[in-house]
Structure formats: C-alpha cells, structure tokens
Image: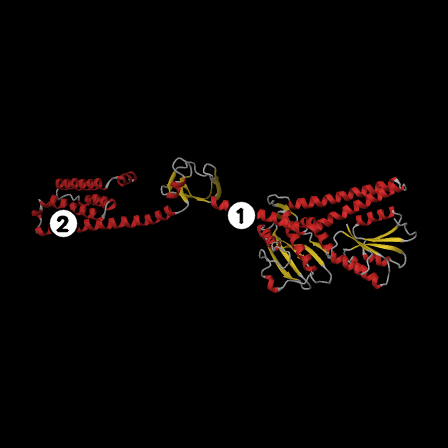
Amino acid sequence: MNRLAAQLKTMSRGRLLAICVGLVVAIGIVDYVTGYEMSVAMLYLAPIFIAAWTLATGAAVFIAVLAMAASFVSVSYIYAEYAQPILHVWGGMIQFAMFVSFAVVVSKLKSALSHADERFATVLEGLNSAVYVSDAKTGEVLYANEQFRRTFPAGTRLPYLPQSAREGEVHDASRGKWYLIHSRPMRWIDGRTVRLQLATDVTERRRAEALYRQQQEKMQLTARLVTVGEMASTIAHELNQPLAAITNYNMGCVRRLNSGHWNEAELLDAMQKSAAQAERASKVIQRVRAFVARRAPNLVLCDINEVVGGVSQMIGVEARQSGATLKLELSTFVPYVHADPLLMEQVILNLSRNAIEAMQEAHNGERQLTIRSRPNGSDLVEVEIADSGRGIDPQLEANLFTPFFSTKREGMGLGLHICRSIVEAHGGRVWVSRNSGEGVTFHFSLKSVFAT
Amino acid sequence: MNAPVEGRVVYIVDDDDAMRDSLRWLLESAGYRVSSYCSAERFLAAYKPDHGSCLVLDVRMSGISGLELQQELNRRGTTLPIIFVTGHGDVPMAVDALKNGAFHFLVF
C-alpha cells in the first residue's frame, strides 16, 4: 500500500488523469456486463479518490461526472424495468451528488493535510540548524532539512556525538567547524527507534569566546604589570635594604682587614650574613618575576588561606612603609576553592594596596589593615579586606568598579575593575561595606568545592 | 677620620634586622661602641641623656616613626645629634628633618 502511494506520488498529472479515466471506463464495462442485479457503483469511488488525492478539485469533479456518466449509460438499457422512468433519473442524480461530494470532501481533506505538513516543513526548512532523523542502528538518514542537506552533502561524514550523550559541542575536523548537537531518541512513524538530532554551527561563538578569554588574559597581565609599576618604589626599597646591608658588612670587613685588628670567626660570620642578604635581594626579584610571568589562567584546588599567606609578605612591606599594621584573621575551617592562586593574589594585593592608600590620606589615628577569611555556609568562601581609613564618599560609591574611574591623582582606575572581572570570572562577586567603626571593608566571595 | 670618642655610644634605631646588624658591624670596625634598638619605643625606654655620641635613625618604622622620635627627643631637650638613614627619603622629608636639627640625612 505504501509502495503504491509512493509510486502515485511520482507520476505526472497527465498520466494520473489518464489512469483515472481508464479505471472509470473499465468499471463502466464491468457495470454493463454484470447488469443491474449486481451493483458495482461503489467501485467508481476508487478513481475519484485517486484523482481527489493527487490532482486538483476540478479534476476530481470531472472524474466524478465521468463515473456518473459511465454508470448511467451502463444501466440505461434496463430503465424500462423501473415502474417510473423518472426513478432511474432520480437514482442517477443521488449517485451523482454522492460522487461529487466525495470528490470535493477528499480533495479538501488532502489540501488541509498538506497545508499542515507544509507549515512544519517551512519551519524546519527555514531553521539555521541542521535537523535530521537517523536510524539508531544503521545510521541511515530518514529525514533531513534544507540546512542539513547544505551543510552535510550526501556521502560526507556527520559530526559524531556519543550515543549516550544528549547534547555536546563536537569538533568537525574535516570542515574546521564546531557544532552544538542536541540528540534525543524517539520512535519513528514505522515503529523503529531513531535519533532526532539538531546540529547548530557554533564556530563563530566559540571564536568570540576564545578571543574574549585572550583579551582577559592580556588585561590581567597588563594589570599585573601596572601593579608592579605602581609598586616600583616599594620594590626598590625592598632591594635597597639588603644591598645596603651587604655594603655595610663588606666595608666592615675591609676596614678590619686594613687596620690589622681582626679575628677570623668574626669576619666569617659577617661574610655569611652578607651572603644571606644577597639571597634576600634575589628572592625579591624572583617574587616580582613570578608575579609578572605570563601564563594561562590555571584553575586549581587551592586553600585561600595559603594564598593570603603568600601575598601577605608583599602587603606587609607596603603596610609597614606607610605606618600601618597588617593583621591576618584566617579561619581554619575555610573549604578549598577552585581558583587561580596568582589571580587571587592579584585581587588581594590590589584591594590591600587600596586600603593602605585610603588610610594614608589625612588620617592620624591607628592604621590597621585586616585580612579575614571565613566560610559562609558550606558553599561560599569569603575574604575580607578591612581598613581603618576615612571611608568612601557616598557619591562616589556607585562608580567604584567603573573602569578608568579613579580618585587617586596617579591612579588609572583599573584596580577595582580588574578585581571584579577576575572574581566574576571565577564565578564569585565583589562588594564593599562600611565598618561599624572607621573605614570600609571590601569583600569577595568564591564558590567552595562543596558548592552544588 | 676623627678618632672615636672613648666611652661614648652610637645608638642605632632601625626596624630592619639586617640593616641594624650590618650598621653595628660597620661602626664597630671604626672603633665605636654601638647600642642598637629595633623600635623607637625600645630606644626611648632605654635611653639616658648624656650617654651617647650620636643616633643613627631610620625614617620609616612601624609604631613611632624616625621623624616623630626626633620631635620627642627635641621636646625632652636632648642634644643628641641625629643622622637619618633611609632607603626612600624625599626632599620635604629631608627638609623637615634638617629644620628640626638633624645632623645629616643619608639616602642609600
């Protein structure tokens, strides 16, 4: 039955019409031969149906009229048998009305069905994504829309998504493209199990994302360089101390050797101390170099307390030089986080330097910088950097994180913006609050490894 | 070089351990007796007038700074000469120190 339907579909209109006419004539002959004792009028419905299903309404009505004519002619030789000849005409009219309305109803039904089909087809064909249905076992493509035929011409390989996966991004090396594929199993119209798949080209999106990541990395590197630049005087001082000490130890040795009054143990001790100071200077340089070194963001399981501990040396030096004291209040119950330790150092360092600077401006009280860490539930880890400065002008608060907004004479206005973009890239957030006493606290939170 | 004054002490106040220790080593090579302190507070607690020959003082320290110590000593009326030693002094700081009677302001 399906094969016959498929065959009918491929035939030309002229041939179909000829077949219908042929059928009507054949049935008419049978009708004539069998006589009035056996009614075969029902058989005329077959050619009428075929015409209505495959051709226009007009053609179907034409076949109905033809069938009526054939039926009328084939039985007309016996109309004398009727009590009234008019009854024969009456019967023929009823039959005619039945044939024509059958032709019209079938034709309308067919056009309604094909309209519904067309709507779906138009939507599917118009989609930017390739939609296709393939046999779950053999992989034979049973349905494919226009976009599919264009993207994957017959005979080319389809991007492969593992059977078990519902969706995923797949790289198609032969086309150099990335596809986002959605896949779901379903039962096809003939009962077999098939996979409905939807493949969308996401190459451009991925390229844009990669570009964005690159720019973020560049920005973070720039941020580190800017920080180092701003810290140049601190770093110079950090180097100067050990270098001055080395000079003192060496000059002390030279003077003793020149004067002739010396003892070996004393000189050895001084030389060793001098060497230790050279080491101290080299550590400063290593630290700066490691801080600047360019590398891809590296998310690892890390202990935020360790990060604070690592960067607290640099902060401590800055604090001491501006007469502030640094206090660490680190909770021992802080869960681990997935983060890049160097970027977290950058955030803590930036916020701490801001705090130190805030306390330097017109402030004579105690200058106290406190860095705290604590868990917030089991999902979040919070780090706080609290100062005892004079606080933030409420009018400026809204602009705090805006790039290139700065209240400092030499500030670039990137520090807080960078902090926020780093923390947000880690899925966390940054905010500021007023202390009950003096100053403000900058907070940032990160998702802990226990967060769902 | 002037001969060291016998019996007189050079005071060092610096919060950097290495600086303090190396300065002591250097000054001892010139024959001075040295007494060193890691903070201005410790120095003030130990200091008795008319004992020292001079004070070698760091400018920036946590707690009482070098300049504040100088002012405190001036208030107490001591005449101890002060030599400031600093890694990052600027002109206003040096002018301040010298106006308040510092003997010298050394930048290394």
Residue A361 seen anywhere in this rendered image of the structure: yes
Q: Which of marks 2 and 1 is nearer the N terminus?
A: 2
Q: How crowded is mark 1: few (under 14 residues within 10 Å), some or many (20 or more)?
A: few
Q: What element carries label 1?
A: helix
Residue A212's disc number: 1
Name the residue beneath numbered marker 2: A92
Give left or right: position of A437 versus B75. Answer: left
Q: The residue marked by circle 1 belongs to what chain?
A: A
The quarter in which the N terminus of chain A is drawn is top left
Give left or right: position of A420 versus B90. Answer: left
Between A109 and A359, the residue placed more toward the observer is A359
Q: In this view, does A199 lie above or below B104?
A: above
Q: Is residue A429 above or below residue A154?
A: below
Q: Is mark 2 on a helix, strand or loop?
A: helix
Q: Determine the residue positioned at 86% across, 43% down.
A: A255
Residue B41's disc number: none
Determine the CA span between mark 2 and mark 1.
Answer: 80 Å
Amino acid marked by disc 1? Tyr
Q: Determine the residue positioned at 68% across, 57% down.
A: A357
Q: Which residue lies furthest to the top in this view?
A: A155
Between A330 and A343, the residue placed more toward the observer is A343
Q: Determine the residue positioned at 72% across, 58% down.
A: A368
